[in-house]
Image (cartoon, rainbow, N blue to C red):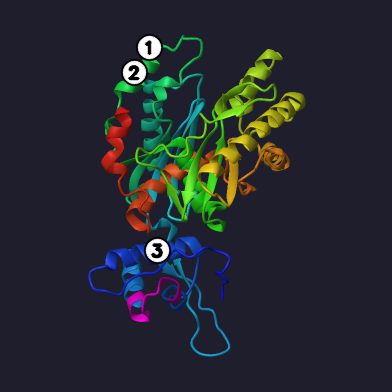
Amino acid sequence: MNDYTAIRPLGHGANQKGLRNHNERLVLSQLQRHGAMPGSDLARLTGLSAQTVSVILRKLKNDGLTQQGKPVRGKVGKPSVPITLNPMGALSIGCKLGRRSCDLIVMDMCGATLFKRSLTYEIALPQTIFEFLATSYADALVEIRPKAAAQLCGFGIAAPFEIWKWGASNGNTPEEFLSWKDLTFHEEIARFTDLPVFMLNDATSACWAEHVYGRGREFHDYAYFFVSTFIGGGIVLNQSVYEGNRGNAGAFGPLRVGDRAGRTKQLLDVASVHVLESALSTAGHDPRDLWKQPQDWSAYPAEVEDWIDGSAHAIAQACMSVCAVIDFEAVVIDGALPPDVRHRLVAAVTAKLPAEDSRGLLLPAIEEGVIGGEARALGAACGPIFSQYFFTTQFASLEQTQSERDRG
């Protein structure tokens, strides 16, 4: 029998008549969170009666959302039949709109990527992005074939809020980039698909991916930093990703920190990859090399080491700031970085944190995320599936409010 003690519980269900949909989501969520288990374990974890669980499992199997594994024979009684999610029971589209690249993926119900297309650019212009999405979506339908395409339940998008403010520097943002302010994602996506659209802030989306498919199950409350062109973050409270009233909770980039020279800056101006890009340009290197896949930054040891040291100095301060607001047990750090660079960055933050003034605070554990560069697209793809199949309130209002978010 599996040991579920290392994973935080999700809560209990209710046997009252009329709550069947709630209980179905709860059963599916336990399977998503813990993996394969027999009905008896599901009853124990959910607090539902064995009869209620049996009825729910029969319906979920008929709907194609679960499947039975091979019976496991024990010493006494009937063989135990583990129940698992059916990966092809539901599929979703996930799109990451970044400042240097755009990704579109198709994800199954268990988090596996079935299709992926990527586009890189100097600046994210609307016409370029939506043409890429339309073409990639059409290619995805062909590749996954009609039977699987029929299981698509939504189109999730992870993008920076107010993206029109993140154009080229020095006041030379092209006029067509500013047109992002007049666009709504759901209207543009509706030009090539009738799937419902779900919006998330890009860093919050990465936090969702880590929480669902990474190390998030290990912690109750934690802060999450995602290091990319610009650093961002997310907040997890009581085992749920907290988006905030306007969807912008965990926007850690603007936190004030001191750089190594003692100057006060925003965190995003010290601990973001664009800082390393500038250093490489100054040294005569092509900063676009940082984004080539698979990522390998070993050609620039001096610049990378200096960037890690400066970023860790700033992130350690930011950790103290966020823990002064909420008593986080951990801070999880991930990013669109080569795994070895991420590991070194986390180690550097861990080493610098004890040197910070922690009077009145409890230091959090500094932990390394495991999802990496695909986190934002995976988190975006979570939106449609979680809102319709799993026990969570986080995505419930996304479709209702996304037009307001698009308008800023």
Q: Is residue 339 left or right of residue 375?
A: right
Instruction: Please state the horizontal and vertical placement of residue 176, each as a whole percent of the image.
Output: 37, 14
Residue 48 painted magenta: yes
Residue type marked 1: Glu
Of label 3 and label 1, which has the lower sequence position? 3
Up the image or down, 332 lies above or below 11; here it is: above
- Tell me which segment is drawn in magenta: 44-53
Count of numbered circles on the image: 3
Residue 223: which quarter of the image?
top right
Instruction: Please state the horizontal and vertical placement of residue 35, each as a whole percent of the image.
Output: 50, 65
Of label 2 and label 3, which has the lower sequence position? 3
> Which SS type dominates the magenta stretch?
helix
Find disc 3 in the rendering and name its residue. 28
Q: Nearer the viewer, residue 91 or 218?
A: 218
Residue 240 painted magenta: no
Give yes or no for contact between labels 2 and 1 (Cβ–Cβ under 8 Å).
Answer: yes
Residue drawn at (32%, 43%) of the image: 398
Find disc 2 in the rendering and name its residue. 179
Up the image or down, 308 lies above or below 144; here it is: above
The local crowd at label 1, few if under 14, some if 14 to 19, many if 20 or more residues have their Cα within 10 Å, is few
Residue 160: which quarter of the image?
top left
* Residue 115 at least partly seen: no
